[in-house]
Amino acid sequence: MKKLISFVGIGHPRDGYQYATYCFDDGFNFRTKLVQLAIAAHEVTINRTPFDAVFLLMTTESKKRYLHELMEGFGYYGILSDHVRIFDGIDTSKQDAASQWK
């Protein structure tokens, strides 16, 4: 079973993530704001198989900003919505070391 496990932040607080071209060692390039979509596109285009499951760690704000775009992109690359699990509600107000281990 092929899985993608990733986190999605908010990027720049004002402007979010910017477009970038992700370049893979095999010569595949993909332009997107979200690296998860570049990885999904690479797997389908080059390796010919989509991920069986995707696990995303998201803050409440990143979910608002990017979940729709991610789900739309995953669908395009053959990743069914019921194969995507979102772990959200991460409390970003407690960024000290002690809170990170709770």
Image (spheres, grey):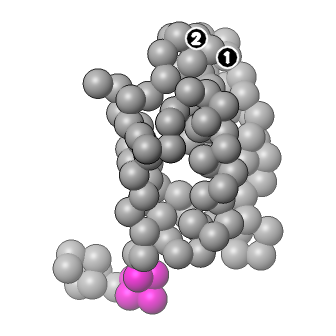
Q: Which residues are magenta?
A: 91-95
Residue lying at the far left in this picture: please name it: 102
The residue beneath circle 1 is 28
Give how far apart the Cα atoms at labels 2 and 1 are. Answer: 8 Å
Could you tell me residue 101's position as x and y percent? 21, 75
Q: Amino acid at mark 2?
A: Ile
Verify CB contact (< 8 Å) between mark 2 and mark 1.
yes
Q: Amino acid at mark 1?
A: Phe
**Label 2 vs label 1, nearer the camera:** 2
5 inside magenta stretch: no
Image height of 86 relative to 24, above or below: below
- Left or right side of 44 for 94: left
| Marking on residue 46 | 2
Say which element carries label 1.
loop
Query: For the point 66% across and 39% down, which residue is it?
Result: 73
Query: For the point 77% across and 34% down, which residue is it?
Result: 31
Number of marks in the rendered image: 2
- Label 2: few (<14), some or many (≥20) within 10 Å? few
Could you tell me residue 19's position as x and y percent? 79, 46
Could you tell me residue 35's position as x and y percent? 61, 42
Front residue of this view, candidates 14 and 79: 79
Front residue of this view, candidates 80 and 67: 80
